[in-house]
Image: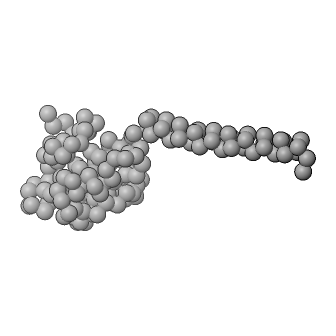
Amino acid sequence: MDEKTAKMLRASATSMSSVWLFSVGMLCGLFLFLSSVTPELGWGRPSAQELMTTAVGEDVPEIVFTNDWRNCGGSSGHQGGCFSPHTPDTIYVSPNLRYTVMKYVVLHELAHYEQFKNDVEINECDADAQARAWGADTSGSGYKCD
Ligand SMILES: [Zn+2]
């Protein structure tokens, strides 16, 4: 190959590698941007399962994320969670809740699981208080307890 072709090839290799570097840079930048604006997605935060085991250890109910009738009629627009004494080893939580809401719902239903297990009366305000003690933000709770 002649000098001219070799020069052209070198130039195009250089520009290809800068395109590649630019793309990598953009991906890193995009990731940092997303993780800074979307902490609500729960990236890097404890999962629902970890929230429960952190609160009470390994004896925790199974979580089923569902909008169907098991979640207290979730399909009818209800957003939240459900604990039923008929299925005490399972709690039902709406899918796609914002992280802070999911955390509250999971810990509130976990409190009902503990109430049931310890033969304590199922009580909404006590469950909110317990969820708060475990670190949940209960300010969005529908229960008027204070
Ligand atoms: Zn409740």
Residue sitting at x 18%, y 59%: 57
The mark total stands at 0
Q: Return the residue nearer the eye: 31 or 83.
A: 31
Residue 25 position in % (x across, y down): 57, 39
Q: Is residue 128 visible?
A: no
Query: Of 37 and 6, which appears nearest the observer?
Result: 6
Whether residue 40 is situated above or below residue 106 in the rendered picture: above
In the drawing, does residue 46 fall left or right of residue 96? left
| Residue sitting at x 88%, y 43% | 3
Residue 20 is drawn in which quadrant?
top right
Relative horizontal placement of residue 76, taking residue 92 as reference (left or right): right
Give whichever of 116, 37 is nearer the camera.
37
**Percent position of residue 66, x then y:** 39, 57
What residue sits 90% from the left and 51% below the top? 1
For the point 43% across and 35% down, the residue is 36
Residue 21 visible in the picture:
yes
Residue 69: x and y in percent read 37, 59
Residue 99, placed above or below residue 116: above
Figure quadrant of residue 62: bottom left
Placement of the C terminus among the 4 image quadrants: top left
- Farthest residue toward the front? 3
Q: How is the image coloured?
A: one colour
